[in-house]
Image: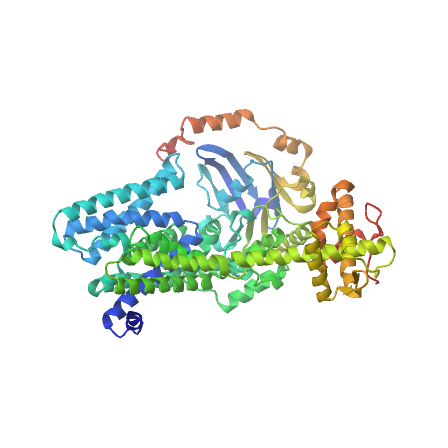
Amino acid sequence: MEKEISITPALEIHDLTVAFDRKPVLWNIDLKLPQGKLVGIIGPNGAGKSTLIKAVMGLLPLSSGFAKLFDQDLNDIRTRVSYVPQRESVDWDFPASVLDVVLMGRYGKLGLFNRPRKADRDAAMDCLKQVGMEQYAHRQISQLSGGQQQRTFLARALAQQADIYFMDEPFAGVDAATEKAIIELLRNMTQANKTVIVVHHDLQSVPQYFDWVILLNTRLIACGPTASTFTQSNLQETYGGKLTLLSDVGDLIKRESFPNREGSAKQAL
Amino acid sequence: MNSFLEFFSFADPNIRYVAFGAVLLTASSAIVGSFTFLNKKSLIGDAIAHAVLPGICLGFIVSQTKNPVILITGAFITGWLSLLAVEFITARTRLKEDTAIGLVLSVFFGIGIVMLTVIQKSGNAAQSGLDHFLFGKAAALVGDDLIAFGSVALILLIVVYFLFKEFALLAFDKDYARSIGFPVRIIELVLTSLIVLAVVIGIQAVGVVLMAAILITPAAAARFWTNKITVMILLASIFGAVSGLSGAYISYIAPAMPTGPWIVIVISTIAFISFFFAPKRGVINRLFRQATIRRTINDENVLKAFYQLGEENKNFFNPHPAEAVLRKRRMQHGAMIKILERLQAQGYLEKAKPGWTLTEEGKLRAQRVVKIHRLWELYLTTELRIAPDHVHDDADTIEHLLTPELEAELERILQFPKADPHQSEIPYRDR
């Protein structure tokens, strides 16, 4: 295992704490992920799986710690990082076509003010082909099924041509055939040494899908290759009851308006 | 009629200026307002609109003139202040955004009205016309005012042109915009400033009280007609321009009349028409589509009744009177006759003695409905493990809805079974 990490880790999280309304929902997470792996984030509801991804993507304020991607700050390598939000996080009645959404994947490279060029359209169409959605390119997005919406988001991520992908529940609302097609696609991506990190719910498919797993329940239970980490005892710890004391202390912090760190008392004012 | 021709021939340069100004103001407000609408922040526009009044009054008190640049600056400042107040209240107290907006709107507007009253009582001759900001007066848009407000409108259009992609992305998926490194805070800041500016210039035409209408209604009306954001915003600007132009006209023929309410009446009428008559999203079309669906369901149910009668006496082409069909399918006699005659006109039934008989096409269509019904019942009982006595109603709906692709998929999954859960034969077309 040591050897696997000796090259630059795709993701390194150090002492990461995230709080909502001062109540910590992730406590002091420490982990490293190697490159080119398909990684599942597993844990019960409210375990902080999406929060972890959002924190790494800089979408939430951190109470402590940091995340580095390929040993660099997120801001220095934005174009190498792709984020797929939860499907329900957007209003699908927005006036846009499937191609419009996929084109958004090119915006990072285009930068501000510039409009998508013909080449960007070609790239977007190509990504739609990869997810088997090319015939829906001009369909209004409100007419898509759940699985098609998910594939549209996936195509948008592909259009970013990133090296590391964070996906928040890409299998939610997806039928079995589509799920299989998606996992196939993700496999191919990892074969090209892309790192793909996926929030996942279905325990049954974990060993079959993922090379690595992160077991999470407001704290990190375990992180490592699926074979050695996805064990009965680790699962028991992840799903077997909450640490009541931990969540009580979190509530206390919130109630008493305490800062999460002594130094950040000012910010919590 | 004479005044109509006089106005719309645009021969008088004064009329040209007023008309051009009104169109520019309302159209640019509508364009900026489209993004407010897409961001689901319609109420915010209303709060800003009311909050610019104290700024205008303050501008007047400080300068003692109606210099448009000073008034715009004052309006811009209090407009922004109101936004910050809403944001602060939502973030730092337990009050929700709608409450915060209501609070800020009324407090700022109240202060504005007090200031306006004080100014009007002060006896300063320059103040006359300041109350136009309450309900708008398109005809007052001349000279320096037109140049000042017109240039702000142009700035709005230029900024929207360059940041179109960014504004659209933020409205659709803000987290994603942040994840690709777009300066979301700054873009939001720019958009908010645009909204404040749009309000500031829009009130010339409509007045603060009704400003929200010109900001939001054109976009809401345009949304009914299209699914493309570019077309939507273009339509919104046209709707805005039409209402602005009519406002200017009314202002011209009835100088005592405030323009704002008229503009709002016109734009509301456009919204009303869109709401009812737009294709696809309009109410009338939806009702029409529902009626079509109901008709299809009724037709197919009657054909199904013929088929079931045919199954009972082993001959699908036996004639049946309306009464026999009614025993299978309860409805009013008159309605049944109407359906039978419609099916006859469509070639699915033929007149016979007694009553009607299925044609070959009618039999095929009925057979397909029956097949899907029974396949679906089987699917529910075998794949979803639903009790056989609970599946009938569900299948009654599905049988009219299933597309040929899903029908084929269903056959494939179940592998062409012979009978449904109630041991009725599943009829396939000869393969």
A159 to the left or right of B359 = left
**Looking at the picture, how far across and down is residue B65, in whole percent?**
15, 55
Give x and y (percent) for residue B326. Answer: 75, 52
Residue A48 visible = yes
The x, y position of residue B276, in whole percent, is: 49, 58
Q: Is residue A9 visible?
A: no
Q: Nearer the viewer, residue B300 or A229?
A: B300
- Is B256 positioned to the left or the right of B394 in the image? left
Q: Quadrant of the C terminus of chain A?
A: top left
Closer-to-camera residue (B168/B364):
B364
In terms of image quadrants, where is residue B191?
bottom left
Residue B243, how many percent across, how many down? 36, 62
Question: Where B129 sits versus A45, above or below?
Answer: below
Whether residue B108 is situated above or below residue A157 in the rendered picture: above
Q: Which of the pair A142/B113 is nearer the observer?
A: B113
Q: How many marks?
A: 0
Q: Is residue B209 above or below residue B141?
A: above
Q: Which residue is found at the position 30% from the left and 48% from the top?
A: B50
Comparing A78 with B379, the one in front is: B379
